Amino acid sequence: MAGLHFYVPNQVLKLVPVPNYHNTKPVTNHSLPSFSSSKTTTKLTSRVYYRNRGGFVRASSETMATEKLGIKIVKNPPESKLADLGVRSWPKWGCPPSKFPWTYSSKETCYLLKGKVKVYPEGSDEAVEIGAGDLVEFPKGMNCTWDVSETVDKHYQFE
């Protein structure tokens, strides 16, 4: 069985049916065996699988990015992507819980090491929530309000 493919804007997700396990922790393919029965054998070949109520769900091998209100977010990018960007060598910035306006005079890419923030782009009542493990891109010219609920520590780079 080839599996099911779903299209979500900016994302491709492929679901692969396999035996049922009740656990929500991510696992890697090197820790999973092949599953056999008298009729079929299903071998898991992707890098990351997520166990859910219906079996394993395989995420696309490409990093999935989402965009909301002009802000691009990659949740938990692989370390290889962070290394390619040189994120660990970028300057760091942090702040305690607070609320303040901000204008991006240049495009900023940042990687949150810790913290939680709701970013409210000007003219919108909706917020974009970002947190530890997110690689985020803010466009040049964006005016917004940062509402920091948990102390932020991040690497950042302006272009």
Image: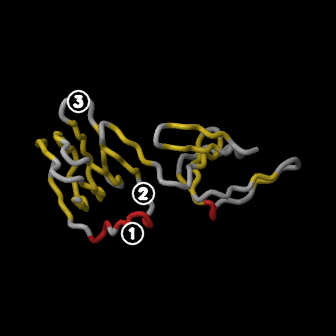
Q: Split into 4 quadrants, where in the image is the N terminus? A: top right
Q: Hey, what amino acid is under mark 1? A: Ala
Q: Which residue is mark 1?
A: 83
Residue at 57 percent across and 56 percent down: it is 48
Place of residue 87 in the rendered image (x, y in percent of width and height, measured from the top left): 31, 66
Which one is in front, 64 or 16? 64
The image's mark for residue 77 is 2
- Pointer 1: residues within 10 angstroms few (<14), some, or many (20+)? few
Separation of residues labelled 1 and 2 (CA atoms): 10 Å
Q: Can you say which quadrant of the picture contains the C terminus? A: bottom left
Of pointers 1 and 2, the one earlier in the residue sequence: 2
Residue in the foreground of this view, choosing between 110 and 113: 110
Lower position in the chain sequence, tag 3 or tag 1: 1
Q: Where residue 121 appears, x then y in whole percent?
A: 21, 37
Residue that mark 3 sits on: 124
Left or right: 80 as drawn, with respect to 1: left
What is the three-letter code of the residue carrying label 3? Ser
Residue 2 picture location, percent across and down: 72, 45
What amino acid is labelled 2 in the image?
Pro
Q: Quadrant of residue 66?
A: top left
Q: Nearer the viewer, mark 2 or mark 3?
A: 3
The residue under the point 63% across, 46% down is 56
Residue lying at 25% horizontally and 67% vertically, measured from the top left: 90
| Cα–Cα gap, marks 2 and 3 | 27 Å
Q: Secondary structure at mark 2?
A: loop
Name above or below for residue 132 compared with residue 53: below
Q: Secondary structure at mark 1?
A: helix
Instruction: Farthest residue to the right: give it.
Output: 38
Q: Is residue 51 left or right of residue 79?
A: right
Q: Answer few, some or many: residues within 10 Å of disc 3's Cα (few below 14, many 20 plus, some between 14 and 19).
A: few
